[in-house]
Amino acid sequence: MRILLSFLRMLPPELAHSIALNSLQLLYQLKLISIFFPQRFSETSFTFKGLKFKNKLGIAAGLDKNGDFINSLGALGFGFIEVGTITPKPQLGNAKPRVFRFSDQEAIVNRLGFNNKGVDYLVKRLERRKYNGVLGINIGANKDSTGSKRVDDYIECFQKVAAYADYISVNISSPNTPGLRSLHSKENFLPLFLAINDAREREKFSNPIFIKLSPDENIDIISEITRSIKEFNFDGVIASNTTVEKSNLVVSSNADLSGGLSGKPLLNKSNELLNFIHLSEPELLKIGVGGVHNKETFNMKLENGASLVQIYTSFIYQGPSIIKKLLS
């Protein structure tokens, strides 16, 4: 496994990503995943609103944007899987190169920009899924949608995935879609929350709804959002998305750092947000994500108020073996 990971790190990041996931898919189809990655770890289940998570570790949105690898990822032993971010129309995302590794710090900077095949493609994948664990779907807006059209994008995705989602997460915090983080302001998130609430009633969607937040907003803005989450009877938050603040990332002076930073350097910033929300709104369910790379940092998320934890960058750097490390 170490040799394979070393080889993949020699390749361009997006090519390595594709090869790794398709290789995992092949092992799944050949029924070999349990041989290569046996699930020999202790599991502490968690139940919320009738959903039973077999353990508290999930894969974050962004790894499987289009739902192509739900079954193979599920076979690795995650307690839940989140796919997306999905948008109404297919879009290519931002220009390449747009993913940059900082391997010595186990960090990634990305400016992907919601590249995905569109919600209709995802629905077709969901209709054929065999994975029977908890599945979350992360929804967003197309890059060229602004104003009320942006809200319409979220609602179109919500309506189309509601029948298949065990929970829906609303991504208002990607730094790579121009203007998306403006949805953290009250004048912008209130119309979105109202529309989501209406869509929930129309679709009779009773499963959890989470709002995925930025770690870069000040506490007054976060407080406004979390109060509104409670007022609309949404269920909680995902804390957090990537950060645009990179002062603790060691890089050469000419490095292009535009985009969102994930991995080890995000740990403290995401934990600060998580802890603040836990202390100010303890009844909201928190999914902690950002910087988890070993058992200690996994436990830190739980200690800071998370009921569930997601990983992304450490899975890319360490491969499926990270699951056993975190759950043993």
Image: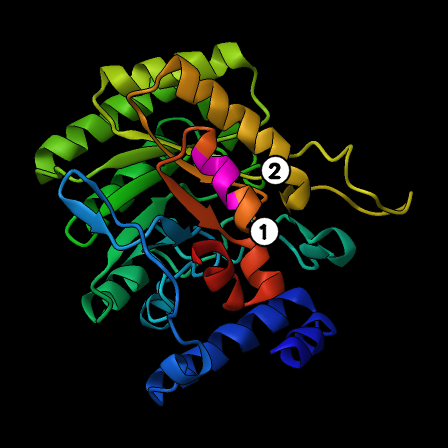
> Mark 2 belongs to which amino acid?
Leu
Residue, far bottom:
30
Main SS, magenta residues: helix
Query: In which quadrant of the rendered view does residue 278 lie?
Result: top left
Quick check: 253 above or below 8? above
Indicate whether residue 255 is drawn in magenta: no
What SS does tag 2 mark? helix
| Quadrant where the C terminus is found in the figure | bottom left
C-alpha separation, residue under disc 2 versus residue under disc 1: 9 Å
- Residue at point 68%, 80% (across, down): 3
Q: Is residue 172 visible?
A: no
Indicate whether residue 300 is drawn in magenta: yes
* First to last magenta residue range: 298-302
Q: If you read the primary sequence from the N terminus, does the residue marked by circle 2 or circle 1 appear first?
A: 2
Query: In which quadrant of the rendered view does residue 67 lie?
Result: bottom left
| Quadrant where the N terminus is found in the figure | bottom right
Residue for badge 1: 293
Asked if the residues shown at circle 2 and circle 1 are in contact, with their CB atoms under 8 angstroms apart, the answer is yes
Q: Is residue 264 left or right of residue 62?
A: right
Q: Nearer the viewer, residue 59 or 174?
A: 59
> Mark 1 belongs to which amino acid?
His
- Residue at point 41%, 26% (across, down): 147
- Residue at point 78%, 56% (across, down): 104
Q: Is residue 110 left or right of residue 136?
A: right
Q: Position of residue 191 (x, y in %)?
A: 31, 20
Kindly identify which numbered label has been placed on residue 267.
Answer: 2
Q: Nearer the viewer, residue 221 or 6?
A: 6
